[in-house]
Image (cartoon, rainbow, N blue to C red):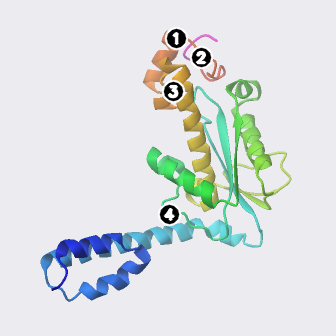
Amino acid sequence: MGKSISEIKKELEQIPLEELSACMVQYESDERKGVQAILASCQKKLEKEEKEQLRLDTMLKYERSYAAYQHICGIDEAGRGPLAGPVVAGAVILPVDCKIRYLNDSKKLSAARREELFDEIMDKAVAAAVGIVSPARIDEINILQATYEAMRQAIGKLSVTPDLLLNDAVTIPQVDISQVPIIKGDAKSMSIAAASILAKVTRDRLMVEYDKVMPEYGFAGHKGYGSAAHIEALKKYGPSPIHRKTFIGHFVEV
């Protein structure tokens, strides 16, 4: 007696993607509508995976172009625009030709997906680190210089010294390593995308912790950005210790 439709469905759902196409062949002659619907669904799954692999190949363009360098490091930041909290930079060196499915510009991903990718990046990376610069320091030297400082911190914390930096749009001063600034690099380079995830997740986790201490500002929700609710709380309660004084002058006296 042949397999039931539910048994075939369960089998094809559980099989690894790389083995799916070969496994589907044995059921192509099964004329049951349920089986044919399952095969059609599997085919769409394979086509989606092929598209994702092509996208990942595109995101390795820069890493492959500079393959003469042994340790290529992606650099990106999170938190240049918020009214509160630190600016955080990520630095990530991935293995050669490393593909991490669904890795993309952190802003294009859900918080849950970013958390999943964070763990995979940390597991696969040759080296990874973050730099964190406080709101007080941002006020002291301005956000651009603070961003550069966070990036230099992150590079300095790496357990492996990079030979080349792929940066999201900027050239970092006071760094004696070759650099390639790439406009919208977090959507074009696997290494920069990984760094953007590292920076974003680290910063979001910090803002959630700040929210536990100062819940009246709602930091866990808006992460320090200038939402209407945040500005309203700022006006009601005044600046917190993590507000950037140079950013909030339009809303409250500092």
Q: Identify the residue position indicated by label 3 in the image.
A: 219
Q: Is residue 172 visible?
A: no
The residue wearing badge 2 is 240
Task: Please name whichever residue, 207 or 233, is drawn nearer the observer in this view of the structure.
Answer: 207
Dot 1: what SS?
helix
Which circle's residue, 4 or 3, is located before the other in the chain? 4
Mark sitting earlier along the chain (4/2): 4
Residue type for callout 4: Arg
Q: Secondary structure at mark 4?
A: loop
The magenta region covers 250-254
Q: Are marks 2 and 1 in contact (CB under 8 Å)?
A: yes
Q: Is residue 65 left or right of residue 99?
A: right
How far apart are the two marked residues, 4 and 2, measured between alpha carbons? 39 Å
Residue 101's disc number: 4
Specify few, some or many for label 2: CA neighbours under 10 Å numbering under 14, 14-19, or 20 or more. Answer: some
> Foreground: 111 or 74?
111
Q: Main secondary structure of the magenta part?
A: loop
Left or right position of 144 against 6 = right
